Image (cartoon, grey):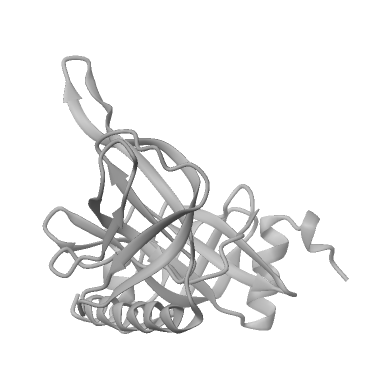
Amino acid sequence: MIKLSFMKPLEAFEFLHREQLPLILSFPLEEEKGHVITGKGICFVDKIHGSSRITFYRFSPANLLNSLRYCTSFYATFDMKGTTYGCFMTEIVPGASTMTTAMPDTLSPFMRRFLRVEPSWKTPVIIYVKPPEYGTVSFEVKDISECGLGFVSPAMLDLEGRIFCGIELPDRHVLLAEAEVVYKKDALRSGITLSGQKPLVCGISYGLELFFHSEDAKKVRLYIMQREIEIRKLIQQW
């Protein structure tokens, strides 16, 4: 038996090919002009070309391959014997019904347990927090799962320890939850300067772990499922 903790990419993709196990693909998808979300789909390994290239086929949902034609890279995750791994796929060459990429250099354990989606620009999810220096403030949520979310603040917020927050879903349900900051870093965007293109700081990006009541977690889970269906339909329209 192969020890997966030491598995090389070639061994992993040979296993996926032999067992005909799917990969989940995540890629940038422009829902509205300037509003990029993450599209998802599945495919299977068709052929392995030595140790340098992989050909994929059996793409789902319909038209997934059309969406991937506009990408320079995508992220792939797959489950093997109880462990989930992830890797970036580059050097994409699409065909009529297949797609060939470079063999990734490394595999990394994928630790995220819950499905995460980006809300629609037209029907955003809003978070309300109350830092002591500002009182109640609100922000559009960048991404959300049933146990966490991310948002960007234009200024640093004092959100230490356990806090209470409100989450407003597009159906106008407002859910209250305890939360805790799990990461805080500069939020970057591209900008053109005299020396060329470089990232510019546009605020502080926060990641919160959320502690919902079980009934409220169901409402978030339902929203995420409905949002996934919307994104799937968007991919099918390409």
Left or right: residue 87 versus residue 63 is right
Task: Return the residue found at the far right.
Answer: 1
Query: Residue 177: x and y, percent?
Result: 43, 66
Left or right: residue 8 versus residue 33 is right
Q: Quadrant of residue 53?
A: bottom right
Left or right: residue 142 versus residue 10 is left
Left or right: residue 149 versus residue 111 is left
Nearest the eye: 38 or 238: 38
**Residue at 64% across, 54% down:** 107
Quadrant for the N terminus in the image: bottom right
Query: Residue 92: x and y, percent?
Result: 40, 56
**Residue at 59% across, 53% down:** 52
Q: Quadrant of residue 86?
A: bottom right
Nearest the eye: 36 or 60: 36
Query: Residue 67: x and y, percent?
Result: 27, 68
Where 211 sits versus 101, above or below? below
Quadrant for the C terminus in the image: bottom left
- Marker count (numbered): 0
Nearest the eye: 207 or 6: 207
Q: Quadrant of residue 220?
A: bottom left
Where 173 sits versus 91, above or below? below
Query: Residue 33: x and y, percent?
Result: 11, 57
